[in-house]
Amino acid sequence: MKLRILIADDHEVVRRGLCALLQAREGWEICAEAKDGREAVEKASQLKPDVVILDVGMPNLNGLAATRQLTQLDPHCKVIVLTITDSDQVIREALDAGARGFVLKSDAARDLVSAVEALQRNRMFFTPRVNDMVLAGFLDKGHSGSSSEPPRLPKLTSREREVIQLLAEGKSSKEVACVLNLSTKTAETHRSNIMRKLGFHSIRDLVVYAVKNNIIQVQMPTQLHNPTEGSAA
Amino acid sequence: MTVRILVVDDHPVVRHGLRTLLGGHAEWEIIDEAADGLEAVDKADRLKPDVVVLDITMPKMSGLEACRLIRKRAPASEILIVTQHDSPHMMREAIEAGARGYVVKSNASRDLLAAVEAVSQHLPFQALNEQSVDSA
């Protein structure tokens, strides 16, 4: 029986590359593709793929939020997250969300097949940096007040995080309501609660927050005027 | 006559995807790949491709800087920017840098083939998402 894989990335050219990589393996098939997290959750719920590969930086619903939803619906769901950055925060969130694999997009051609193989054998697959973080977490257990601990973020519900992403992407409250199947009044209530909890006064503050906390991922063109700097990816 | 194409992107999986999308066309040949702007300029200079498919955000040298240099060193090579930046401002910068075409990665299936077809005949091709055009 073939291993069924669902791929989600908002860039079709990336999906084509991933499909080509994975379909070359005998016994693997791409059962579906999705271009955002919401579509990925919907298709995964219907099709029950063996492995789900989710880009973190997708519109509408990012890969981390989609991972949370998928693993809440089915704790046995095997998710690999693909990301352009392996920052501490993204790693923590991916692990908290229930991802079993973590692959940098820049290394996908090298690592993704191994990642899928690992998950197929009910193992996990992480980059060495993630392994180090997980190990450091075990060793530091019980040490509180460490300066390396992340600052405590305000307690936001998963729905509020979804709303933040949509607002940061430029959607109005009415559009948010439409995407999430809510009334406009409920969407506006979420928006007010978020702004109050985070102490923000403008959407600009929200966008900055969303970028800093990897709710939306932005690859900045840092090389445009500084050609001698290293990779931004 | 075969259109010779140089594919440039810092992510191997994207280069793989571009090859897959472009590979089906009988008269197009992917002659080489590059993973950064410096390599792109060097290979364009040596190989003189008909079309350079070029990402913007890359290490060592950005796609826009590479575009400017390629236009000087291989003036017969047309440049098609394929980028995640769905931005009228970025598109203007790319055209000013000498690119003939500009498409967004999220619309690759819709636009890429037509874009390569156009720029290989020295015709312009620029396409953004509708919301980006409206907000320009």
Image: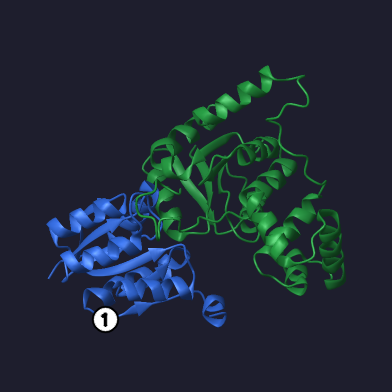
Residue A109 spot, x, y in % from top left:
39, 42
Q: Is residue B52 above or below residue B124?
A: above
Quick one: B104 or B74, which is closer to the camera?
B74
Q: Residues within 10 Å of mark 1 (few under 14, many from 20)?
A: few
Q: Describe the element under mark 1 as helix, strand or loop.
A: loop
Quick one: A216 or A144, which is closer to the camera?
A144
**Position of B12 compared to A132: left or right?**
left
**Position of B95 compared to A76: left or right?**
left
Residue under label 1, please give it. B123
Say what amino acid the circle numbered 1 marks.
Leu
Q: Is residue B48 above or below residue A152?
A: below
Residue B58 spot, x, y in % from top left:
38, 53
Instruction: Mark yes or no: residue A15 visible.
Output: yes
Note the chain letter of the blue one.
Answer: B
**Position of B28 compared to A197: left or right?**
left
For image coordinates 70% across by 41% down, the residue present is A71
